[in-house]
Amino acid sequence: MAFTDGQRVALMPPAQDHKRLRAGDRGPNTGGMGAAAPAPGVLYAGLMVTADGPRVLEYNCRLGDPEAQAVLPLLQTDLFAVLTACVEGVLEPSELTWRSDVHAVDVVLVSDGYPGAYPPLPDHKAALAAADRVQFQGKQYRQDIAARALAREILCAGRLTYKSAGVDIGAGDAFVSRISALLRQRPASVAVRGGLGGFGGVYDLAAGAADVRDPLLVAGTDGVGTKLKVGVRPAGRLGRDLVAMCVNDLLCQGGRPLLFLDYLAAGRLESAPLDQLVSAVLDGCRLAGCDLLGGETAEMRCVYSEGAYELAGFAVGVVARAHCLPRPDLMRPGDSLLALPASGLHSNGFSLVLLDGLQTQLSAVMAGLTAAGVVARPVRARCRVGVLISGSGTNLQALIDYAGRVDSSAELALVISNKDGVKGLERARAAGVPCQVIRHTAFAGREQFDLAMHAALEARGVQLVCCAGFMRILSARFVQLWRGRLLNIHPSLLPAFPGLHVHRQVLEAGVRLSGCSVHFVEEEVDAGALLVQRAVPVLPADTEAQLEERVKVAEHAAYPEAVELVASGAVRLGEHGRLVWRH
Ligand code: GAR
């Protein structure tokens, strides 16, 4: 837009109108949803930027709105004097002055439906209030008026820079060039393509792991964390610790370290320890036999205070598929656990030191552990479990498998069957679990039989008894002797369907859900506090055998889970007959 007296022209600052209804220049065209001035690139006449470039829309012999509302507040010269000069033909463009220290922005509030048909404003006076206080049904207005112009203006004026945001690029560059000098002292291996020192890098696996058959990549990440605060070691050594922690995690998987990348963030990069840190990372890589492929260094004054920093990294290694660790399939109860004494505090445990201020006490503990030397057997005693069976023993098998796991709190001490020649006995023998047949038919009464079992269990030092498909009702005496240490699995969601022929009962009842229950045994049959239950659907075409099969799958997960709860001491039976959970 411009003032003119017919001969001379005084340009006004350009204003940018926002014609589209919605933010991001979407929605239908309107008479203008707001304007900002000054804005670069647009001179009045009205122009529109199209896919084919700018096009003149119109010339007007008037101020356009809302542009005028954004432009005129910037005019320092008296508007009446300017207009008078226009009318009298004495306009002196050079005498017009405009404010350059402020921006003017106007935002238009429009009715729902605009720019189509729209209802009149219910209260036109409301439009005079501040935009965010104006309320009327369907009110809409753009919140991004002038956003782009402002961002450009700020950037052009140099007000928004990394420096102004507190980041010193120069210091970063200087730091990186010091690191590059360090890197040059240690040439990369042939597997590194394109050199070291970038944010990332390329590693030629065929060259670096040519000797590894059927290679798998292993990776690990870590940070130096809270030991930064402890100050137990020189800052530079932490870099070595960092590499060690990452490559140790590869070693646990059988991996040989190939490459390492570090991430160093600091409040201020000029701080002296940072050079030492990176130099120590390089040292760590040398010791671990891997390349420092790249890294990122960030100065973040808004996150880290002066002198504070964080150092993290990750390592990638390689392992032949056949040598990948761990091998749980080879681990057995009774295996030896070897521990090597540490020469002092290294990787972990520093949060504890910080938390309790126990630095000296912890050192004493560490010294004691070191003096104790190699720990030859697991410290934790496992709960000795006896299993009572009558048949196929698939639940027994699930318990055998569970007890064979290294993290199990139970070991199987004895299997007793009241019948000879059942499959469950084969399973026990195959797993090397001691087993015994005690025929109930050989005893005059239920209690005598139970007491024989009791004696056998005691003789084996059993601490917890599990009935797994044991099809005998236990005497009150036996239940009392083992109360709180006696579990049973039942193939229904108790208290529904206790007793025998459970799946037939379930199908006849027409319920849609069944399952299994593991519970502490009480004198009343299939009663007692429930430890674990698992549900399975009852399908429309189910036979008893099909439902039994499905329930058994659930049982094989539920029983080990329940035994672990009791064997680990997480749950016990309270005096009142209900579960007591250890918190
Ligand atoms: C299991 O379904 C178990 O719940 C059930 O006998 C089956 C034994 O199978 N027990 C009872 O019904 C006890 N009332 P398994 O011998 O294959 O473990």
Image (cartoon, helix red, strand yellow):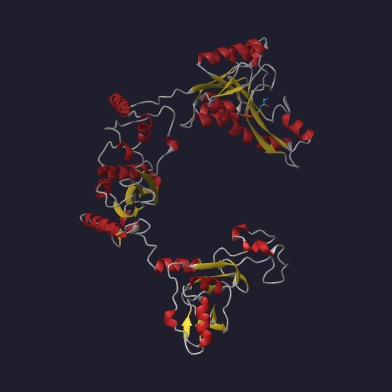
- Front-most of 337 and 298? 298
Q: Residue at x 28, y 44 (%)?
A: 240
Ligand 1 occupies quarter: top right
Q: Is residue 37 above or below residue 52?
A: above
Task: Measuring from the top left, give residue 194's x and y in whole percent.
Answer: 30, 63
Task: Measuring from the top left, give residue 326's x and y in whole percent.
Answer: 41, 39
Q: Residue furthest bottom?
A: 7
Q: Residue at x 27, y 43 (%)?
A: 235
Q: Is residue 318 above or below residue 42?
A: above
Side of 420 where 205 appears, left or right? left
Q: Is residue 278 above or below residue 522?
A: below
- Front-most of 521 and 310? 310
Quarter of the image holding residue 435? top right
- Front-most of 290 and 159? 159
Task: Measuring from the top left, give residue 420's x and y in whole percent.
Answer: 61, 22
Quarter of the image holding residue 324? top left
Side of 551 where 408 appears, left or right? left
Q: Residue at x 52, y 31 (%)?
A: 402
Q: Is residue 1 visible?
A: no
Q: Is residue 369 visible?
A: yes
Please count the marks in the image. 0
Side of 165 where 505 appears, left or right? right
Task: Measuring from the top left, give residue 48's x and y in whole percent.
Answer: 55, 79
Quarter of the image holding residue 155? bottom left
- Front-most of 373 and 538? 373
